[in-house]
Amino acid sequence: MKKENEMKWNLQFQGPSHSIQKNEEFSMKSALITTVRDPEDGSTGCIAFPENIRQFEHLHTCFIGMSKGSRSSTSMYSRFWLVIAFLTYRIRTNKVSGQCHTAEYSVRGMYLRGHTFKNVQVELHETCYFKCTEEVTCQSYNFVIGLNICELNNRTKEARPEDFLPDEMRYYMKRLTNRGLPLGSIAELPAESCTEVRASEGNDVENTKHWIYSDEKSLPIEALCEGSWQKVNGEYSVCFGAKDNQYGSVTIPKSGRLRAMKLIHKSGSLRCNRVTGSSFWGCTYRAYNGTLSTIITDADKNAVLPPDEDLEGFDVSQSHECGTEKHFYSLDGTSHNSTVLVFRNLSNPLSVSRDQELQIWYGQDLKDCSERGNSGKTCVDVFAWYE
């Protein structure tokens, strides 16, 4: 006798039926397996979508046979079809070869503002979904209730949460199946930053290239994203020395406001004299007491990171050759041999412009003091975190 909490579903989709029990793992080639939830009693069932969702546009292409207790198959069929046709109930999707993850559902009374690239007049609101799948750049859509207008968006609410706003005359829907192309994957669908790509695509942006606007909403460039970080230098590392104005030069590829910057050590080291040990970022001479001396400046040698107010100099009583010149600083959690130097959580985000030059200096070289015995160079990759 079948237990009350078990459920059997017969799925027929252009071929033999496939029977499963609730929570049973199974596979089906070229299909997207979707779990739907009955809003009345909380029961769930699975539906097979074709990978080519357009084949599913007509009702006769998929029949779902269901049985549970004395419920009418016709009644259950109608209600679960509404879940698919109108996409109004929460669903979970599972790619056949992957694991289940929470997918999108329609949100009545909300819409995504400012990211519509096309308006389409329709007779039935479920048609919006298929109109969205026809557009490579469509990531989601708003439906205008009463006017029967589909507003096709090139962003999702995850990418632009600040633009997800209430409107009782609309509902919002994210494209359920593979959204054509991920944000930033082609030049025709550039993101504003790696931060936006990560918000939209999740963790699938680690060490991958994406198309990013380089100047406001124009001039897309291909950039390497490491999470929310964008690599600023190109193929080659940036190197800076310890004396004789051997600064490293970085050309900013994108305009915007920086929340943070980081340098990742690739090779080399620096010495501030012939006796003390080497360092990636500073001088190991005891007078410096573990502080760091790698400074990012603008093209006029004005300190940018750390800002000038965070830099220190020696007390007059210490009689150091650099005197009170501000050229070193402390950074919690970072030592001479840390492989990453991060300037984070800027109280005032740093505004930068496309093609602007930034320079990386060793503190003593920047101030032209106590550098005669200095030697070596450090090479780094440079990353920026844009708002």
Image: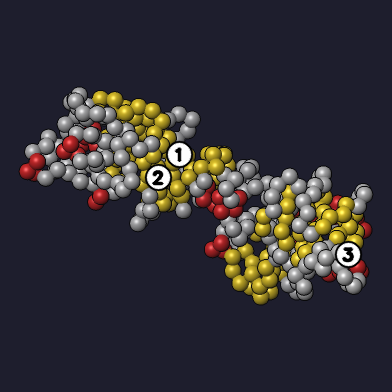
In the image, what residue type sits under mark 3?
Met
Circles 1 and 3: CB atoms closer than 8 Å = no
Query: Looking at the image, is 155 positioned above or below residue 222?
Result: below
Looking at the image, is mark 2 or mark 3 earlier in the sequence?
Answer: 3
Which residue lies under the disc numbered 1?
Answer: 232
Query: Looking at the image, is 384 positioned above or below residue 40?
Result: above
Query: Looking at the image, is 272 positioned above or below residue 28?
Result: above
Res. 105 image quadrant:
bottom right
Residue found at the far front of this picture: 1
Q: Nearer the viewer, residue 62 or 12?
A: 12
Mark 1: which secondary structure? loop
Measured in 3D between alpha carbons, the distance from the residue under mark 1 to the one under mark 2, in whole angstroms, is 10 Å
What residue is rendered at 67% in x and 58% in y? 102
Looking at the image, is mark 1 or mark 2 earlier in the sequence?
Answer: 1
Q: Nearer the viewer, residue 270 or 339?
A: 339
Res. 87 image quadrant:
bottom right
Res. 378 image quadrant:
top left
Residue 193 in percent (x, y) is at 52, 48
